Structures are given as C-alpha cells and as structure tokens.
Image (cartoon, rainbow, N blue to C red):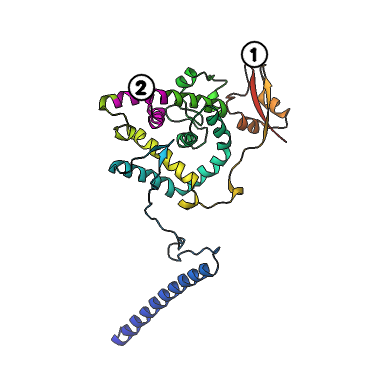
Amino acid sequence: MSNTFKIISIISLISVIFLCVSANNKSQSNAVSAVANDPKAVANDPKTGTHLNYKIQSLKLPDNLNLAGERVPLEIVDVKERMERELLVNTYWQSNGLLLLKRANKYLPIIEPLLAKHGLPDDFKFLALAESGFTDETSSVGAAGMWHFMKETGKEYGLEINDNVDERYHIEKSTEVAAEYLKNAKEKFGSWTLAAASYNAGVYGISRRIKEQEVTNYYDALLPDETERYIFRIIALKEIINNPEKYGFVFEQEDLYTLPKTYTIKVDTAITNITKFAKGYGLNYKEFKILNPWLRESKLNNSSKKLYEIKIPVK
C-alpha cells in the first residue's frame, strides 16, 4: 500500500469519526433544546439512553427528622451516616419507592383511624410499611400479615391463628393488636423509639442490651444490624411518603392504588365451600380471598359458632 493511499485512508477515518461525534453532539443539543421548548418532552442521552436530567446526588438531611416527636440526634456521626443510608437507599430504589407510595394510598386510610383510636402516634403507620411493604407475604422466620406478627405473639394478644383462620392477615384486628403491643412497650421503656425497636428485636432483646450497655436511648445502643437499620428505615419512609416530590417521585392521584368499597356480613356458622359462598355474592374465589385473606382455606370450619365479619365489595 502506498504512503499516499495510507494518508488518504487515515484522513477519511478521521473525517468519519468527526462526523459521528458531531452528529451525537447535535442530537444531544437538539434533545436539550426540545426539553427547553417543551417541559413535557423526554430527552435521553443518545449514548446511554439515560434521561439528560437524571442525576445521582447526595441528599441533605432535614433538621427535624423524628419518630413520634422523638428527635433523631444527627449531630452523632454514626447516627447521621445510618440515617443517610436509609434515605438514600429508599430514594434511589425508585421502583420499590413508587410501589410503596401506591400501596400506602390503599391501606393508610384503614390504619390511620385505628392507631388514633388506640392513642398511638400516627408515625407508626410507617412501621407497618417498613415491616411488610403493605403486602401479606410471610417472612423467612414466620412473621405474617402486614404487621408481621409471629404466631406466639399474635396468640398472646388474642388473635386466632390456626390452619383455617389466621387473624394476623386481618388488617383491622392486627392493627389494633400492634397498637396494644407498642403501647405496652412504650410504658416499659418510656420511649416510642425504643418501643418501635422492640417490635423488631423483642422487648426482652432490647431490655437485655440496654441493661448490659448501661444506656437508656436507642441511638446510644449497639444493636443487631437489622434493628440498627430499623428505626432509620421507618423515618426514611415517613420522610419520603410525606414529601414524594422532594425526592423525585412524580405521579397523578389516579396512579395510586385504592381498595373497593365494601360492606360487612356477619357469619356464625360454618362455610363448607367458599367458592360457592362467594358466587352467591357475585364474586369468584380470588376476589373473595383478596378481601378476606385471614380465611386461609377453602372453607370456614367454625365449630364453636363464633361470629365472624366478612367483607363483600359494593357492586
């Protein structure tokens, strides 16, 4: 190959590269201009596909972070770092955050008045959100329902729990039991924050550790990793749910989930076949069970003739 041909080839290659770079820059410039002219336009970086306005940035912690009025002492270095961790994780885990916002609209209207009825601070609705994400999935250690009660604790507080009926999945009854548990823990510890921590680690677990360490404050205690993160996660969710736009969550009211309007029927006999029972109210088995998840089988035994309340959607 002659030197002249080599030089021409190199010049051609440089020209192609220059044209590609220019085209990319022009494309990005056009995208930015489009957004400037139309705020609703979506501009993506042609190289990465990422929105041009998308940034991963550090968050400024609000000064007034608290749980039930008990202030988070952000002047303590490790407390500030742990609080930042949970706020960052729950802000930038966008898909999960948006789902929690959607579900919160569905279930908070049920939980809020029940907490108020039992004299519990409103902030504890975020404890249920932190526990279960407002789903009825059972944890790896057997905690069930939105409030994640263990079987023994649920029974201790009067919930019916067996293969046929499990009231840990009954949102109203389990919320009232959670309120009683937390009030009892507050009476013991004198602190809502320690009461909330005991919901995760148990009253005995918290009592033993603060006694061994000779402290009286959650933020001064060295606790298991899950409990160390627990309070901060609750507070982070409270901050995000209360101020979604501040943390980049944008949605319309119609995007949020809602529960159907229901009425209650009372049953004091056995239901031998829930499928047929549901059909009598114009429902299929799945629709019936979604509204009454505490019924764990395809029948209700009820040999004791107990009075149960069952939800039926308003058609």
Q: Is residue 3 left or right of residue 107?
A: left
Find out whether residue 189 is within the magenta segment.
Answer: yes
Which x, y percent locates residue 129? 48, 37
Q: Which of 268/7 is in front?
A: 268
Q: Which residue is mark 2?
A: 204
Element type at mark 2:
helix
The magenta-colored residue range is 185-210
Check if mark 2's residue and mark 1's residue have beta carbons within 8 Å: no
Q: Residue 305 — which label?
A: 1
- Distance, label 2 to label 1, CA atoms, is 37 Å
Kindly identify the amino acid type of the residue bearing the numbered disc 2. Tyr
Q: Residue furthest left?
A: 213
Which x, y percent locates residue 102? 55, 44
Seen in the picture, residue 27 relative to 246 is either above or below; the reply is below
Classify the position of the C terminus by image quarter: top right
Specify the principal SS of the magenta part: helix
Q: Residue at x 34, y 32 (%)?
A: 218
Q: Which of 67/107 is in front?
A: 67
